[in-house]
Image (tube, rainbow, N blue to C red):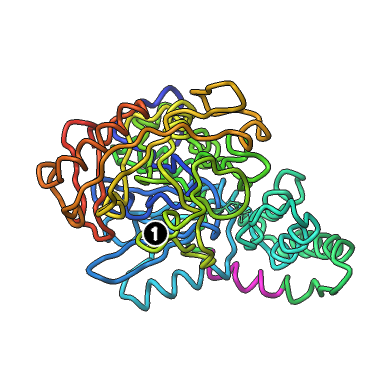
Amino acid sequence: MYHHTSGPYISTMNLAVLGAQWGDEGKGKIVDLLSPRFDLVARYQGGHNAGHTVYVRGRKFVLRLIPSGILHDSVTCVIGNGVVVDPTALFAEIDELVAAGVTVGRRLLISDKAHVILPYHRDLDLLSEARRGERKIGTTSRGIGPAYEDKVARRGIRIGDLADPTALEKNVRDNVTARNRLVSETTMDWRPVLERLLEQAERLRPWVCDVSLALSEAMRAGRSILFEGAQGTLLDIDHGTYPYVTSSNATVGGVCTGLGVGPRAIGAVLGVVKAYTTRVGEGPLPTELLDERGQRLRDTGNEYGSVTGRPRRCGWYDAVAVRYAVRINGLDAVALTKLDVLDGLDRIDICTAYRCGDRLLSEFPSDLDQLARCEPVYESIPGWASPTKGAHRWADLPENAQRYVVRLEEVSGVPAAIVSTGSERDETIVREGVLAI
Ligand code: IMP
C-alpha cells in the first residue's frame, strides 16, 4: 500500500547536540544526560576518531561509533550515512558494551549508505601524514580521511554493498590494487580483506536499514530524536580551520546530509562548549597557553585524548570562536562543561576579540594565515576559591563562578542551558526555561 509521506515535517521536539569548539567539549556526557528525554539518538558524521566519554556510577565508557544514548535501555541508536564505519572497531565497541551488561540487540540501526573504513585506509592515513612532514594534520590515524576521500571519489564501499559478494570482490580488488600502488613499502593481499568483509557482513546484517526512512517513520509516529555530532565546529571540513580539520561536516548542516532528514526536523540546536579551550592535533589555537597555566588546565581537566591518549593543547575560553559556532550552527543555547576545572584559580582570562597587526577583529577570520597571526585580546575576571565541583543547583555556585558563566553568555551571545560541574550525570546544573528540552 502506498503511504503519502511527502510534505514538510516540522518538529520542535528534536534536538541537535554538537561541538562548538575544536572537539572534546564533553558531548558524550551531555548526550547521555539528555538521552532519556528522546526515543532515538542519531550520529550523523565522523567515525571512531570520536571518543565520547560517559561516566555512570564511577564506571567509564568511551563510545566511539555508537551514539552516546546506548546506555539507556529505552533509546534506539542510529548510525547515519554520513558516518564512516570500521566494522572491526564497531564490533569491539559492541562487545565491550555487552561485557559491561549493556544490551545492544535491536536498539541499533546502521545506514546501508554509510561508507566502510577498510584496512588500507589506515595505511593511507599514516602515509599521507608522513608525506606532509611539517605540515601534518595530526590525525587520529583511524583511516577517517582516506575513507571520506574514497566516498567523494565515488569508489567507496558502502555497508549496503556488502550484501553483493560479486560486485564487492571487484571493488575490493580495485581498491587494494590502488592502495598497493600508493604504498610501495608493503603489499596488501585483497583476498583476506574480502573474506573478512563477507564475515563482517553477516554480523552487521540485522542492524542495516534505510535510516532516512526509519527516522521519517519514527517522527511520524511522534518519536523524538537527538542528533549527535562528533568532533567540533572548528574541525568541520568546510567551516573549520582548513586544512587542520577532520573530513566531515561536524556542523549542523551535517544532520541533514548525514541522516537524510529535512532541516525542519531539527527543533533546536545545542552547542557544547568547555569553560576553557582545548585542541588536539595541529593548526592554529589563538588562546593556547604554552606555560604552566596550560599545563595546569591539562592536568586538572585530564586533557589527554580519549582515543589516542595524546596530550591536548589547552588555553583560555575563546569567545570569538564560540560566537562563530553560534553563527554557523544557529545555536539556541550551549551546555557549558568542565567549569569545575577552573576551581581555585586566582584570575581567569576570557578572549573577547583578536588583534591582528593593528586591526582589532571581533569575527573569527576566514583566512588561516590571518588566524595564525592573531593575538587574543583578554578580559581578566576574578576566580573563585570554593569548589563548584559536583554542584547541581545554580544557587550552589560561588558568586564569582556565576559571574563567569554570565560573562561567557554575554560575550558569546548565547545562553547556557546546562552547566556541567563534574563527569558524573548528576554533577550538572540544568537551568530550566533556557531551552525547552
Ligand atoms: P581525523 O579526524 O583523524 O582525520 O583527524 C583530523 C583532525 O581532527 C586532527 O586534528 C584530530 O586530532 C582531530 N580530531 C578528530 N576527531 C577528534 C575528536 O573526536 N576530538 C578532537 N579532535 C578530533
Residue highlighted by disc 1: 296
Question: Which residue is painted at 38% across and 50% down in the image?
Answer: 27
Is 276 placed left or right of 207 in the picture?
A: left
SS assignment at label 1: helix
| Image x and y of residue 148, in percent | 67, 49
Task: Locate the N terminus and report the quarter of the image it occupies.
Answer: top left
Extreme left residue here?
395
| Image x and y of residue 72, in percent | 27, 59
The part of the chain drawn in magenta is 195-204
| Image x and y of residue 389, in percent | 21, 56
Q: Is residue 132 above or below residue 284?
A: below
Taking the magenta stretch, the answer to whether it contains residue 202 is: yes
Taking the magenta stretch, the answer to whether it contains residue 193 is: no
Question: Which residue is painted at 59% across and 63% down in the image?
Answer: 86
Task: Locate the C terminus and report the quarter of the image it occupies.
Answer: top left
Is 61 placed left or right of 252 in the picture?
A: left
- Answer with the quarter of the image where residue 94 lies: bottom left
Mark 1: which amino acid? Arg
Name the one closer to the observer, 156 or 350.
350
